[in-house]
Amino acid sequence: MKLLLDAEHEALRAAVRDLLTDRADSARVRAAMESPEGFDRDLWIRLGRDLDALGLVVPEKLGGAGAGHVERSVVAEELGRALAPSPFLASAVLATDALLALDDEKAQQDLLPRMVSGETIVALAAAEPGAPWGPGAATATEGAGGWTVDGRKTPVVAGDLADEFLVVANAPDGPAWFRVAAADVTRTTLTTLDPTRRLASVTLRSASAVRLESADPRAALDRVADLAAVALAAEQLGGLRRVLETTTEYAKIRVQFGRAIGSYQAVKHGLADMYCDWELGLSAVRYAAWAADEAPDELPVAAALVANHLGPAYFRGAAAGVQYHGGIGYTWEHDAHLFYKRAKSTELLFGSTAWQKARLADRLEIGRRAAG
Amino acid sequence: MSDLSTYRENLRAWLRANAPAPTPTIDLNAAKAFQACLFDAGYAGITWPKDVGGQGLGPEYQQIFSEESSDYELPTSPFGLGMGMCGPTLNDLGTAQQRTRYLPKLLRGEEIWCQLFSEPGAGSDVASLQTRAVRTDDGWVVDGQKVWTTNAQFADYGTLLARTDPDRPKHSGLTMFVIDMRAPGVTVRPLRDMTGHAPFNEVILDSVRLPADAVIGEVNDGWKAAVVMLGHERVAIGSRGNSKTNPFDFDGVHAMARDLNLDGDPAIRAGLADLYTRERVLDLFNIRVGQETSAGTPPGARGSVGKLAGTMLARLAVEVVSEIAGPAAAGWEPDDTRADAVALGINSTPSSGIAGGTNEIQRGIIGERILGLPKEPSVDRGVPFRELKVGTQR
């Protein structure tokens, strides 16, 4: 097990941070989140074209960097740290992992090189209410003209931006994967808790679809979910670190009753707890990313583990960040609320905390035999 | 194969062949015999210098020993304070004579050490201690009282922190000494803790005479020595990784839930998932810090993270165990050993958040040394100790 980064990883981090410091400061993040598209397409293209940061897990023969999940988690950390609005989670994580988990070379060759460059955005439409990873109630039917899909998928990360969708639906032979063009669906941009990440609902009415080859569609779905949990945990880790840094700095300069508020134990101890959450979370994220690359047997538990630690830890930290900033932390102008909303949104996005605990319990085979 | 993996293989084989079966209580003679056996095999004082009987190896070898030995319940606890705290401090600050007199015997398990810092009036604020050491023609005379002194009941020597100049501010009038625990005037009394057991003691010091060469470091520079020792303590606690022998680790608690047919209960399942999460992230933290240490970055004040997280883990484990046990943990038949164990867990958990630096002190260390937050204003800074209120004085 390797839980340390090497110099190349740190160089990647520095390159991404430099770009984001320049292009995703608070003012730019706010401008992007309020823009019609909800993200900074120019920054997105730079991430792909200049830094090769969108295809880190994609093999070189498909246009990627041929690196791995440790590298991608470093990028996700930095994006989470900056709160940079982008379709990274949708296209460079969910849809990329799905294409790599499936066995459809044609779709891989057609889509991945364009996704890696940032030119094409692909979203995963799997979730439905009560089924965060599908297949839900969506159905797929094969007719004379090919496959069509019916159903309503929500939430779909970056569903309002995507050029194409990968859809999970029930075919007569079980869950199956389909490729559907944006023009063949109806989508509604959702009102979101987190203004820095767009979500949509996607309605498919006899939408024409191409079925994607997969030896085991359900296993592919599990793998996509696990890898997404790792990437999302890295994003949460980066956000938590930023909240820790900004709140600590504020506690050093904000004076009340004649002292910096960080000298009071009530504040100092809360920040110490946040630091512990971050240290533990860092260890867990490094492990899960290592497992994704090197120990696939450990990934299912590792993914559920990071979801269970980082989700609540980030929200605890972000809530404490608002609290320790006091009144100013509750204003729209201060960024504390953006982290708070991102934290809660990511804690819930792929399944509530109760759902995450139950998933970890399943993976640990707790109570597997019939209860009672 | 690298040196490290050869070392690990050899150690693993040695432990398989030599680790004694665990016993419910410590047999001191057996413990001493095992320590001698460790010494002869070259596994005592792994990072200690060779001139005092150590192996002179790097921290990565100690890390391997911690990892491999965590599968066993080795009877090394009587030597824990000596090996983890007193010995390393003597090695850092002791005279050549002190080092050669004490360290080899400590390593071989011939002499047991304890640490005499805390007092009834000086807990977290240990620098406010009141035990006095007064200079005489040929040494010192010590009067005072120490508490929470683990292993004092069988210790041969102790490291004592005493006040040598009450006219200086509290931190600058202290001196550290080696004290012979069999000297006239030393009285050790067992102190019962809230579990009803007596794992530690109070030590009364009544006109105890110490020779002049008992001073460790410089006279009135005892606070520096104490800081050195507490630094070693944090490392010792942080590297303790014996979760595999803890009955209330995830596996133990899961087994209990299964035995009682409660592992299908959603609330218990959620509790077990939480317990696994907190236990595993702490394991991973320790592994990561171990890898960093091997790569040349010492844990530093992050030892406090491990200690604090360990306390919170222990509390959660007891919460989950209590939920599983239910009313049976409130009242049980005398022969119900499981309920006994649950009750002991409930009653012993508070110690982890107090011993070796309270949670509040650990959070202060993290806040000040890692995050760089300002200290509380100290009303006693620069004030001669004589003029201070300490403990519960009014």
Image: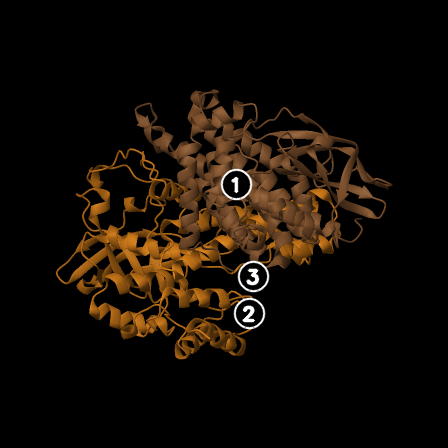
Kind of residue at badge 2? Pro
Task: Say the numbered circle drawn on residue A11.
Answer: none
Q: Is residue B329 visible?
A: no
| Foreground: disc 3 or disc 1 | 1
Distance (Cα) linking label 3 and label 1: 32 Å
Q: Is residue A267 above or below residue B132?
A: above
Q: Element type at marker 3?
A: helix
Q: Residues within 10 Å of mark 3 (few under 14, many from 20)?
A: some
The chain carrying label 3 is B
The chain carrying label 1 is A
Mark 3, residue position: B244
Mark 1, residue position: A235
Q: Is residue A346 visible?
A: yes
| Foreground: disc 2 or disc 3 | 3
Q: Element type at marker 2?
A: loop
Q: Is residue A319 above or below residue B34?
A: above
Distance (Cα) linking label 2 and label 3: 13 Å
* Near-viewer residue (A216 or A117): A117
Which of the 4 image quarters holds residue B265? top right
The chain carrying label 2 is B
Which quadrant: the C terminus of chain B? Answer: top left
Kind of residue at badge 3? Lys
Which of the 4 image quarters holds residue B334? bottom right
Work out whether mark 2 precedes mark 3 in sequence or the reverse, and give the earlier one: 2
Kind of residue at badge 1? Glu
Q: Element type at marker 1?
A: helix
Task: Say the numbered circle drawn on residue B22.
Answer: 2
Distance (Cα) linking label 2 and label 1: 45 Å
Q: Colour of chain A?
A: brown
Which of the 4 image quarters holds residue A252? top left
Q: Are marks 2 and 1 in contact (CB under 8 Å)?
A: no
At 66% from the left edge and 56% from the top edge, which residue is drawn? Answer: B338
